Image (cartoon, rainbow, N blue to C red):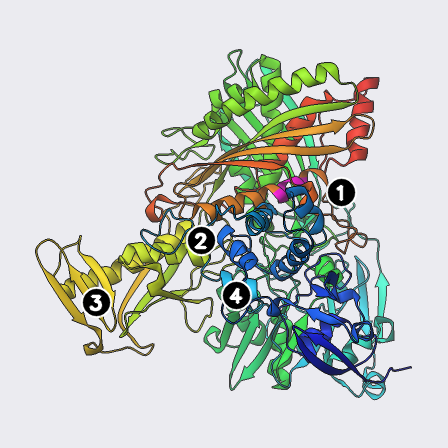
Amino acid sequence: MTLALEPITFSVNGESVTVLAKPVTRLTDVLRDSLGLTGTKVGCEAGDCGSCTILMDGAQVCACMIPAAQAAGSNIETIEGLATGEELTFLQSAFHRHGAAQCGICSPGMLMAATDLLRQNSRPTRREVEDAMGGVLCRCTGYVKIVDAVMDAAYGTDTGAVGQSGMAVGASLAKVDGIEKLTGAEKFGADVIPEGALALRIVRSPFASASFSVSDLRPLFKKYPGLVRVLSAVDIPGRNGYGIYPEIKDQPVLARNVARYRGDAILALVGDAETIRIIADDELPVTYYPADPVIGLDAALHKNAATIQKAYEGNILTRGYVCKGKEDPNERGEKPKPIDEGPIVAEATWQTSFVEHAYIEPEAGFARRVGDRIEITAATQAPYMDREEIAAVLDVEPAQVRIIPTACGGGFGGKLDVSVQPIIAVAAWLLDQPVRCVYTRPESMAATTKRHPARLQARASCDEQGLLTSYELQGDFITGAYASWGPTVADRVPIHATGPYRVPVVEVESTAVLTNEPPAGAFRGFGVPQCAIAHEGIMDMLAEKTRIDPLEFRLLNAIRVGDETATGQVLDASVGIDKCLEALRPYWSKARGQADMFNERSRRRRLGVGLGCMWYGCGNTSISNPSTIRVGMDATGMVTLYSGAVDIGQGVSTILTQICADAIGVPVTSIRLVTGDTDLTADAGKTSASRQTFISGRATQLAAEDMRAKILRLANVGPHGLIEVEPDALFVRDVHSQRRIELNTLSPDEQGNVLTGEGTFDPPTTPLDDDGQGSPYATYAFAAQMAEIEADLDLGTVKVRRVVAAHDVGRAINPIQVEGQIHGGIAQGLGMALMEEYVPGRSENLHDYLIPTFGDMPDIEIMIIEEHEPLGPFGAKGIGEPALIPTAPAILGAISHAIGTRIYQVPATPDRVRAAILAARTGSGRD
């Protein structure tokens, strides 16, 4: 029985409203769709993420769990009602100062929960803040800045961002897009519904491996008049395949007869939103013929394994290889020959799991046809990559495709691959009507890419003094049903496998393996976090065998300026791993001593302290990696920064604005930003691989310096001239002369700019030869983290109490944002180490798949190390991926210190920790 619409009256932000809705309609839908209050976000529709938190009669509730009828007569407060006019509340201002909003998708829910708390308790403790806000999840911040902001709002303890004046680079300026995030004004993929838009829902395979057929669809249209079109593979105008690499386009927009993983796209239903929602999958004329799926590495590599894709024999997508210093290198595929080893050897095998990105914003967007062009508005990390893929799918020229990125509610690599973009483009192109698609949380988790599971067999040696002599690794990585970023992971792992250490003899091979599992793609590190678990475990084992302190062992072997990497690259600048370790030394000595004293007295509870080090090449691997940025100044003196670098919460928009301001010599307040739109900006490359600050930042500096040089030439002023922006004019002076430039006397271009500048930067790299020798990256970031944990030997539970993190970032353009990235990386590394394990079909929601919450976060202390990078903007390099990589190894080292045995499979869940303890007690463990 279909429920009728009923008038429902309640108050929203102090105004009485009456809406027509079904009594069971979610309150989120009423607020967003009926009232246009899209500041209330939807991340799960299950009450798990808290992004839809509002106040109902003064108490925080998840609006997605409230039926419209229950709201009748109530007083509702949403994010839009917090601020008065243009004035932020003190709480919102505190969030802004502290950088408590990164991507911003959880910020409305956080603010509403914090408002509820402070009304009830104006002087909360940090623990009370964490408890009161624990129902709202954040994947970006690590929660630290959020708690800092709430405490600031309660006590006036302002230690946040500084004002926008003086030199911008090096200052903790508030985000240029921060206010929109904190008022509900920022628009994410699901927040815009164009007039007349149809809805689209993708029908996905319930089987991991199956062939299928589709029969007569006509009865479906008769039963559901609101159904406009059912799209299948035959409806794709151009290439029915997409992917990251020019030579690999293996993932179909809609599968043709064969589904290769649970979640593969089969059909697309287009019609009114209510119709496509109520059509059940078992009503569709799709017949599946399931086959036994190939799950896991052993099954995929078995000699009798079924072939996932015919193009890849033995289910091997690709291999990566690095060999250095070995007298008799292997030929590819040949049985391994012995490697020269030192007298002290350590070896072990580690396993890692699928890890879900769990960004709070599910994939969403819309497409519309404009004449012979298509426009796609969606959340993405790579607008120009999207443009190329859509053009090929539609069989049109790239110039006919416009990508307009919305705000991105978290990405971490997961929104590099296209999701909704190809199919909504096809539907809008064929129907000449706007079409939108919003993934549900289960759909997002079932269908999109994950971190690669890995099996890492490592072996290393050193001499009696502790100097490393060799390192070997065989790394097998599940890349799932399709390639996604598998080749990049296969390339990065051998390069980074040794960690930030000098090793004279190295042989590493990585293998990307196809299975009937979700595609594994880019996730904050491209395989480096997995191999860091292995190399840091090996460092601990060798340190133990040589009886050298683990920190001193690492410091003894730390790579330094002038040393050669495993690929033969000589590092000539900006190598800070030794300084990172030295910064940790006093913390390490004290914490280890305290833990050992505690453990002598405690039988059940044990403390552990561990180390994790890392290095990470900033940018694409061994290939051209350019970014182009443009700037323009109009007749009023306002500078526009045209940036194709998408901000996914990491703060690149603010970083580039700071760089631009100082490179021109004008205040940050003189700069406005146009970002992402492929019609308005040049290609700045994808937001990934910790490349945007380094590469787009340098391009921004060059573009700004280009404009500055033109201004100085116009004024006939020397290179050290000062530029002052006045209304409609520039006043330029140096010690010898001064001149006023009347901007309205200069001819404007099509964008209204009277002065322009452009910069392109492509970091110098070289391809790797057959032995993996070459210079794959222009610069590397370095870090060392120390983790302190408490383990319960009876239960196997582990609590991370403290993390001390030292990161070499080259130059901190914005220190408070650097800190925020490190906090967020530590949170994700903690999740990888202790709790996050994605299992297809079982953990496709944020209730069964656990990510860290407020209560899981340890105390964090950060030390920013600045080893100037000559190629970087003002000496800067990246921080996004490096923030996460050392955390899991440090936690695993701490667990080993506490329980006396090692964990070889992550996450180190209580059952695995308890099993390792019992195995060690009975003598069946590997240590």
Disc 4 or 1, which lies upstream in sequence?
Answer: 4
Q: Which residue is mark 1?
A: 303
Query: Does the rendering let one see residue 511?
Result: no
Q: Nearer the viewer, residue 311 or 654?
A: 654
Q: Residue at 54% x, 37% y: name it.
A: 494
User: On the rendered structure, is 330 left or right of 813?
Assistant: right
User: On the rendered structure, is 51 left or right of 682?
Assistant: right
Q: Position of residue 6 (x, y in %)?
A: 82, 84
Q: Amino acid at mark 4?
A: Glu
Inter-mark Cα distance, 2 to 4: 22 Å
Task: Find residue 360 and report its image quarter.
Answer: bottom right
Task: Find residue 800 and report its image quarter.
Answer: top right
Q: Position of residue 247 (x, y in %)?
A: 54, 59
Are there few (<14), some (14-19), or many (20+) residues within 10 Å of tag 3? many
Residues under numbered marks 2 and 4 in contact, where contact means CB atoms less than 8 Å apart: no
| Element type where label 4 sits in the image | helix
Inter-mark Cα distance, 4 to 3: 30 Å
Q: Amino acid at mark 1?
A: Lys
Q: Which residue is mark 4?
A: 180
Q: Amino acid at mark 3?
A: Leu
Q: Amino acid at mark 2?
A: Gln
Q: Which residue is mark 3?
A: 730
Q: Position of residue 415 (x, y in %)?
A: 59, 59
Q: Residue at 68% x, 60% y: name it.
A: 51
Q: Which residue is mark 2?
A: 692
Q: State which quarter of the image contains the N terminus.
A: bottom right
Disc 1 or 3, which lies upstream in sequence?
Answer: 1
Residues under numbered marks 2 and 3 in contact, where contact means CB atoms less than 8 Å apart: no
